[in-house]
Image (spheres, rainbow, N blue to C red):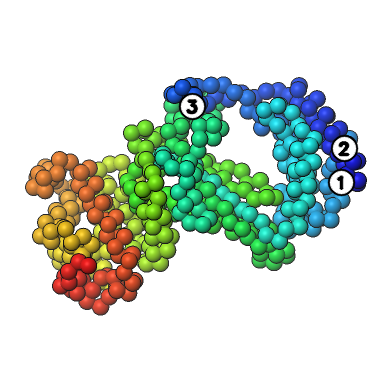
């Protein structure tokens, strides 16, 4: 088909689409929207993607649509790509994707020029040997005061402006079900991942296989970013939603089953001064912790504690996280004199991590944290722990949790700087050696 003939076909199709679209049933939803003057308001607006999809569906029996479908089906690159990339690259799916791209929301119409350029770009894409895959996760619970924080070459935390936040606000279809929860305007961060993959048809590197690999890899990376944030600073963090996309396949979005509410007071602010430390934490979580079985087990329990809302449950998990490190020797658990070894090894390690910490004070602190954990686990009277808090001069169990988690973060970072085989729980006589050396 000549270019002039193709353009005429696309113009005819867009005229048909616009005629159908003008009579399409409208779908309206509610959203909490950030206002220019500050604050939010519940506003009703049209959900255009519903009406656009309905319009395209109603046009499938029209001559211009059938002609474009036949044209797409006859292209050699399309005949090649369908068995490689699967259902989502069948001609009918590709036409639908192109028509959605041709819709201009601000003008409420399908644009023929836009459709033509999308088609040209699409045909060029089919012949490429490498494709960019991407994923996005909305990180709730964080507010960025900087445009972007780069965690790696492929992974970034990106600040959203007000328009982007409003566009991404969850929809409220039933006002009685979620009146307040679905307002995430105080979290302005997206995790964005982009990576280029080589495509080799009819091999383990086919488009279909690479797409599945990228989706799984990106999902794991998003989880690692959340773990990084939790290691860096205690808070309530949540991904809602996460989405995956590739040039040829619509990835869609995945939403959690339970929708959580994050109080404005729980939002953590990050700025330029946090960028370097967050990058270091990401590398620590991605590389160091995952490659050390002891640290991985300990960190997993620490994350459970971070997510706990009940102070008693939280300190139990934090102490168990410490136990995984302090009561391990050359890969085996220390079974004798556990409370003594926990406090002694803990004081030695903390004095090594931070020379300003007093060994005797740290030994007493770790002993009492272990005793608090034991009292909770074995159902002792709460007055026993109240006596310990008074002895330690802490006003609450929450204050103890804050302190023990701060010390844990410092320790994990310091251990990461030591060769894995020289870490005290791995090395021959590691704990004994640590007890005899000064902090460096």
Q: Position of residue 201 (x, y in %)?
A: 73, 63
Query: Which badge, 1 or 3, comes first in the chain's sequence?
Result: 3
Q: Residue at x 50, y 32 (%)?
A: 162
Q: Secondary structure at mark 3?
A: strand
Q: Residue at x 54, y 51 (%)?
A: 193
Horizontal side, residue 426 vs residue 160: left or right: left
Of 219 and 411, which appears nearest the observer? 411
Tag 1 residue: 71
Query: Which badge, 3 or 2, comes first in the chain's sequence?
Result: 2
Say if 204 sits above or below 195 in the image.
Answer: below
CA gap, disc 2 and disc 1: 10 Å
Tag 3 residue: 34
Query: Which badge, 2 or 1, comes first in the chain's sequence?
Result: 2
Q: Secondary structure at mark 1?
A: helix
Of 315 and 125, which appears nearest the observer? 125
CA gap, disc 1 and disc 3: 45 Å
Residue count near mark 1 (Cα–Cα under 10 Å), binned few <14, some 14–19, many ≥20: few
Tag 2 residue: 9
């Amino acid at each position: 088909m000549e270019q002039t003939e193709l353009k005429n076909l696309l113009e005819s199709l867009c005229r048909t689409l616009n005629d159908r679209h003008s009579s399409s049933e409208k779908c309206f939803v509610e959203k909490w929207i950030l206002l220019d003057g500050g604050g939010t308001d519940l506003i009703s607006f049209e959900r255009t993607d519903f009406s656009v999809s309905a319009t395209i569906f109603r046009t499938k029996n029209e001559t211009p649509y059938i002609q474009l479908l036949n044209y797409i089906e006859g292209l050699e690159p399309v005949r090649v790509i369908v068995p490689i990339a699967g259902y989502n690259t069948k001609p009918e799916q590709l036409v639908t994707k192109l028509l959605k791209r041709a819709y201009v929301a601000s003008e409420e119409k399908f644009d023929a020029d836009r459709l033509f350029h999308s088609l040209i770009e699409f045909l060029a894409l089919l012949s490429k040997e490498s494709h960019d895959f991407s994923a996005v996760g909305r990180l709730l619970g964080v507010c960025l005061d900087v445009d972007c924080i780069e965690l790696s070459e492929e992974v970034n935390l990106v600040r959203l402006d007000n328009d982007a936040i409003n566009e991404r606000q969850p929809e409220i279809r039933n006002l009685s079900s979620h009146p307040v929860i679905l307002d995430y305007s105080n979290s302005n961060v997206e995790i964005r991942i982009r990576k280029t993959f080589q495509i080799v048809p009819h091999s383990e590197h086919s488009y279909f296989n690479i797409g599945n690999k990228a989706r799984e890899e990106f999902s794991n990376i998003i989880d690692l970013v959340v773990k990084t944030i939790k290691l860096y600073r205690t808070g309530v963090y949540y991904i809602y939603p996460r989405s995956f996309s590739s040039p040829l396949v619509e990835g869609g979005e995945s939403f959690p089953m339970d929708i959580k509410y994050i109080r404005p007071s729980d939002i953590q602010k990050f700025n330029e001064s946090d960028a370097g430390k967050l990058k270091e934490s990401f590398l620590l979580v991605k590389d160091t912790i995952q490659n050390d079985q002891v640290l991985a087990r300990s960190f997993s329990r620490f994350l459970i504690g971070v997510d706990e809302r009940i102070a008693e449950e939280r300190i139990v998990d934090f102490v168990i996280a410490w136990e995984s490190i302090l009561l391990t020797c050359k890969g085996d658990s220390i079974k004798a004199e556990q409370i003594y070894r926990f406090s002694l090894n803990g004081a030695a390690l903390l004095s090594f991590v931070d020379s300003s910490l007093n060994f005797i004070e740290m030994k007493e602190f770790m002993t009492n944290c272990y005793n608090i954990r034991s009292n909770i686990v074995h159902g002792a009277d709460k007055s026993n722990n109240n006596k310990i808090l008074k002895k330690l001069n802490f006003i609450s169990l929450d204050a103890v949790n804050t302190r023990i988690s701060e010390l844990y973060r410092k320790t994990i970072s310091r251990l990461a700087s030591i060769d894995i085989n020289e870490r005290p729980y791995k090395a021959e006589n590691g704990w004994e050696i640590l007890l005899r050396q000064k902090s460096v």
